[in-house]
Image: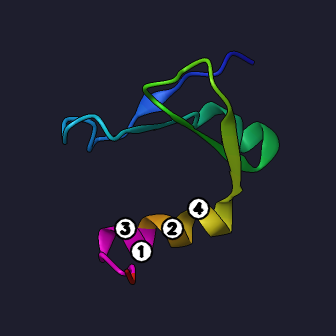
């Protein structure tokens, strides 16, 4: 299966961007994420529950400095 990477909808915020490959989720059960500025670099894989919790925290700005 060919990975299709999708850039974050926040990619126009100055370049701090991530991409993810949704086609891999069904095949592997993990969400691959990489730095959009380094598309040939490494990708991290997150389980679906962990990724969902992260996205929810981002949407609610629920991070502590």
Which residue corresponds to the image point at 42% horizontal and 72% vertical from the top-left?
A: 56
Q: Is residue 59 magenta?
A: yes
For the point 45% across and 30% down, which residue is it? 6
| 22 within the magenta span | no
Residue 51 tag number: 4
Q: Position of residue 50 (x, y in %)?
A: 64, 68
Q: What's the magenta region?
A: 56-63
Q: As rendered, which of 40 and 58 lies closer to the eye?
A: 40
Marks 4 and 2 sit apart, C-alpha to C-alpha, by 5 Å
Depicted 51 relative to depicted 27: above or below: below
- Inter-mark Cα distance, 3 to 1: 4 Å
Q: CA distance from mark 2 to mark 3?
A: 6 Å
Query: On the image, numbered disc 2 is attached to which residue?
Result: 54
37 or 49, nearer to the observer? 37
Q: Residues within 10 Å of mark 4 (few under 14, many from 20)?
A: some
* Secondary structure type for disc 2: helix
Q: Which residue matches tag 3?
A: 58
């Amino acid at each position: 299966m060919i990975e299709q990477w999708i850039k974050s909808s926040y990619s126009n915020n100055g370049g701090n961007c991530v991409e993810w490959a949704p086609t891999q989720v069904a095949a592997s059960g993990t969400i691959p994420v990489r730095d959009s500025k380094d598309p040939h670099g490494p990708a991290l894989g997150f389980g679906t529950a962990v990724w969902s919790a992260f996205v929810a925290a981002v949407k609610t700005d629920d991070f502590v400095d």
